[in-house]
Amino acid sequence: MPITPHPITGESVPLTLGHEFSGVVEEVGEGVTDMRVGQRVVVQPIIYDGTCFACKSGYINCCDKNGFVGLSGWGGGLAEHIVLPRSTVFAIPDNVSLEVGALVEPLAVAWHAVNISPYKQGDSVLVLGGGPIGLAVVQCLRARGCEKIIVSEVAGRRREFAKQFGAHFALNPMTDDVVTRVRDICGGQGANLAFDAAGVQAGLDQAILAIRARGTLVNIAVWEKAASLHPNNLVFRERSYMGVATYVEGDFQDVINAIASGELKPEAMITRKISMNEIEEKGFKTLVEDKDNHVKILVEVAP
């Protein structure tokens, strides 16, 4: 969150939180003809300038000045009311609830990561981390027909979630030799792809060695501190290491369509529903002290 004015919003802390949210349209602005009062919607929260090289190339997620609704200004999901540009708002169909609509944003992160990766039918995949993004990656891979998904996750409950959402194998990196197990599962060659949704050094070390020659490691995680790697582990097996960031235009609508068609069934990601007056104890505190037993805690802002 910006401590100096954000270059687009002009806002800095304190700010209203919440970048994964859905709601109901109360008013529409002048000239808006394709939205109506009462329509149920989700918000794509990327803030971008539209003028830099990345934006003009279609990479709004890589904007030189990018930010997020709920992190950089323009209000947030925890506000009772919010005013946003038409371009950020996506209608959800009648068979998609507002609750599930709030999951579109993290699912779009995973959808984009799988889209931009070299994944193809028949590939084996290692996913590092069984948190919300890792579990979303599992679901998106299953939606693409992946038949060999391996999740590496320390927490037992999250390994259970991973299996529930479609992982074929769930490893404990504290007790399993992840590199050896992945190679064994993948016919001695290692996985074609790995997605890092954990962002820890030990996982990075394991993932690079667990992918096969000319395999790819896709980094989704936002790291808290610098990581290190030995380039020779990439060079001598011609492995690739790529970064991905959030999502681009089209990903939100693709996820909405996939949920509406039943291709994605993310409802079980919501592990608790709370009201605004419970946020501190049953929301933030729970995610600090008991995060292993939860995926997404949903806040009902305006009943």
Image: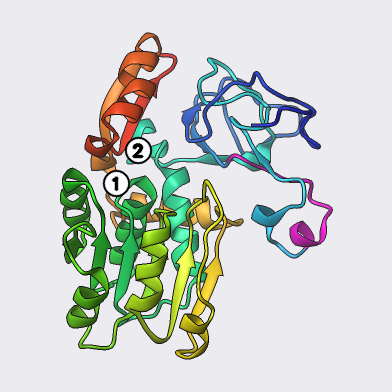
Compared across the picture, whether 55 is left or right of 77 comes to right
Q: Residues within 10 Å of mark 2 (few under 14, many from 20)?
A: many
Per the image, the residue denoted by label 1 is 266
- Residue 100: assigned label: 2
Q: Quadrant of the N terminus?
A: top right
Q: Is residue 50 magenta?
A: yes
Badge 1 amino acid: Pro
Answer above or below: position of 300 versus 162.
Answer: above
In this rendered view, identify the residue nearer to me: 220 or 74: 220
Q: Let me know if residue 239 appears in the view.
A: yes
| Residue drawn at 64 percent across, 54 percent down | 61
Q: Residue furthest top?
A: 277
At horizontal 57% and vertical 20% (from top left) the residue drawn is 26
Above or below, 216 relative to 86: below
* Mark 1 in CB contact with mark 2 (< 8 angstroms): yes
The Cα–Cα distance between marks 1 and 2, rounded to whole angstroms, is: 7 Å
Crowd around label 1: few <14 · some 14–19 · many ≥20 (10 Å): some
In the image, residue 88 above or below residue 186 = above
What residue do we see at 50% from left, 30% from top?
Answer: 39
Q: In the rendered view, does 218 fall on the left or right side of 100?
A: right
The stretch of residues the image draws in magenta is 45-56
Q: What residue appears at the point 34 percent right and 60 percent down from the top-left corner? A: 128
Disc nearer the start of the sequence (1/2): 2
Q: Nearer the viewer, residue 300 or 161?
A: 161
